[in-house]
Image: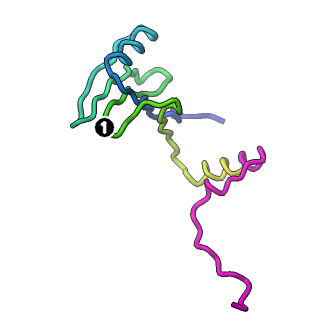
Amino acid sequence: MSTQWNPLKWFEIQVTVMARAKAFYEQVFDLTLEMYRMGSLLMAWFPVKESVAGAAGSLLKGNKYQSSLEGVLVYLTAFYINAVLSRLMLCSHAQGRKADRYSPKKPASKSADSSQ
């Protein structure tokens, strides 16, 4: 199994107080985050180097975004989505999990009982 790309594409850490979050991550990782504004959205981008492993990401502050204890929004890359979904369903099945929520939506079938 050889991966020619980084499957983790982008991550967003939603924050409430940008200055505090930016200072925290800069101190913890000993780096500088660059600030960008896109309309009302404020972002602090983690540095990225294309020749090394790792994914790009940012801190994100905006009206629709709230920091939470539930985690980070992560974007993944999948070039062949049907193959990825098939493997996901196999893994879920092997672990005893219901994989229906990952399946493409199918139209509801009519009831076999025609006595209605």
Q: Residues within 10 Å of mark 1 (few under 14, many from 20)?
A: few
Q: Which residues are magenta?
A: 91-116
Residue 3, given in percent of the width and then of the height, sits at 58, 34
Splitting the image into 4 quarters, where does residue 30 fall?
top left
Residue 19, given in percent of the width and then of the height, sits at 31, 17
Residue 109, given in percent of the width and then of the height, sits at 64, 77
Image color mode: rainbow
Q: Quadrant of the N terminus?
A: top right
Amino acid type of the residue that numbered disc 1 sits on in the rendered structure: Asn
Splitting the image into 4 quarters, where does residue 31 fall?
top left
Residue 29, given in percent of the width and then of the height, sits at 45, 11
- Secondary structure at numbered mark 1: loop
Task: Looking at the picture, tell me which residue is in the foreground, 88 or 61.
Answer: 61
Look at the picture and state if 92 lies above or below 4. below
Asked if residue 109 lies left or right of residue 113, the reply is left
Q: Quadrant of the C terminus?
A: bottom right
Q: Which residue is mark 1?
A: 63
Asked if residue 30 lies left or right of residue 80, the reply is left
